[in-house]
Image: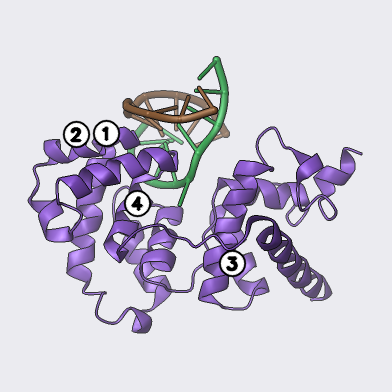
Chain colours: A purple, B green, C brown
DNA sequence: ATCCGGCAGA
DNA sequence: TCTGCGGGAT
């Protein structure tokens, strides 16, 4: 209980420090909710620059819309998303999640949807795991769920928030318990973790420049 | 060479 | 837990 309060304060402190360093991240890039869904699949273990090339291809082919994407032969879809890598699986995954998107009728009343129920539906789709599901829920549907990724787990462990790298769901629930349920905070905090992981808290960390140097166990242990 | 805003199957 | 998937940028 006491520890929980300290953790709450520490998390908000971390967010403040990251936000000061990186600025508001304005996530998720994309011109429509459906484009965000597509990007969430395409970016699986893939550099965002390559995802943008694939999305450009889809735009140029005028299939960045659910019905038109589904009307495209799967081999043609594979060709378009090729720059994003894993294109054989991703083309299939895009079709599956697009079918879900059309079936769900979610666009009408996303605010009323039950987040955990929707998440369960998404997880049934082959190729949609925890992170992709949460990205779709948070960034495309603007529903309150905290997205975890490899950067977040690594940084949280190094900072000393967690003892070692936690699994996806426990870490997600920890953040959701310790932070105010605020969609905009969830949105930007995840983006800040990514910025931290790409810039400082890499595999080979750059602790000397890190904005969290003052509160990070790992940084302190190196002095 | 290495790494990427994961996931599924074994 | 380990491995295949994969093009593209550094």
Q: Earlier in the sequence, mark 4 or mark 2?
A: 4
Image quadrant where one finds the C terminus of chain A: top right
Q: Earlier in the sequence, mark 3 or mark 1?
A: 1
Q: Earlier in the sequence, mark 2 or mark 3?
A: 2
3D distance between C-alphas at marks 2 and 3: 38 Å
Is label 2 or label 3 in front? Answer: 2
Q: Quadrant of residue A178?
A: bottom right
Label 3 resides on the chain identified as: A
Q: Helix or strand or loop: what does disc 3 sit on?
A: helix
Mark identifier at residue A39: 4
Badge 3: few (under 14), some or many (20 or more) residues near its Cα, within 10 Å?
A: some
Which residue is disc 3 drawn over?
A173
Q: Quadrant of residue A142?
A: bottom left
A72 and A125: which is toward the camera: A72
Residue A78 locus on image (x, y percent) = 20, 36
Badge 1: few (under 14), some or many (20 or more) residues near its Cα, within 10 Å?
A: many
Which residue is disc 2 drawn over?
A79
Label 1 resides on the chain identified as: A
Residue under disc 2 on the same chain as residue under disc 1: yes
């Amino acid at each position: 209980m006491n520890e929980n309060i300290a953790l709450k304060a520490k998390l908000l402190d971390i967010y403040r420090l990251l936000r000061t360093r990186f600025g508001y991240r304005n996530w998720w890039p994309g011109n429509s909710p459906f484009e965000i869904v597509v990007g969430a699949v395409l970016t699986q273990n893939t550099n965002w620059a390559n995802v943008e090339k694939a999305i450009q291809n889809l735009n140029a082919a005028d299939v960045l819309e659910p019905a038109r994407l589904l009307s495209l032969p799967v081999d043609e879809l594979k060709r378009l998303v090729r720059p994003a890598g894993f294109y054989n699986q991703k083309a299939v995954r895009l079709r599956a999640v697009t079918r879900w998107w059309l079936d769900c009728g979610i666009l009408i009343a996303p605010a009323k949807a039950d987040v955990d129920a929707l998440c369960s539906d998404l997880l049934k789709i082959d190729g949609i795991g925890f992170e992709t599901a949460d990205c779709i829920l948070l960034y495309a549907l603007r529903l309150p769920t905290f997205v975890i990724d490899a950067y977040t787990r690594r940084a949280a462990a190094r900072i000393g928030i967690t003892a070692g790298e936690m699994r996806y769901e426990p870490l997600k629930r920890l953040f959701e318990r310790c932070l105010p349920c605020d969609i905009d905070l969830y949105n930007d905090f995840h983006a800040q973790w990514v910025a931290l992981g790409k810039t400082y808290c890499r595999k080979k960390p750059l602790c000397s420049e890190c904005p969290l140097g003052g509160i990070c166990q790992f940084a302190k242990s190196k002095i």
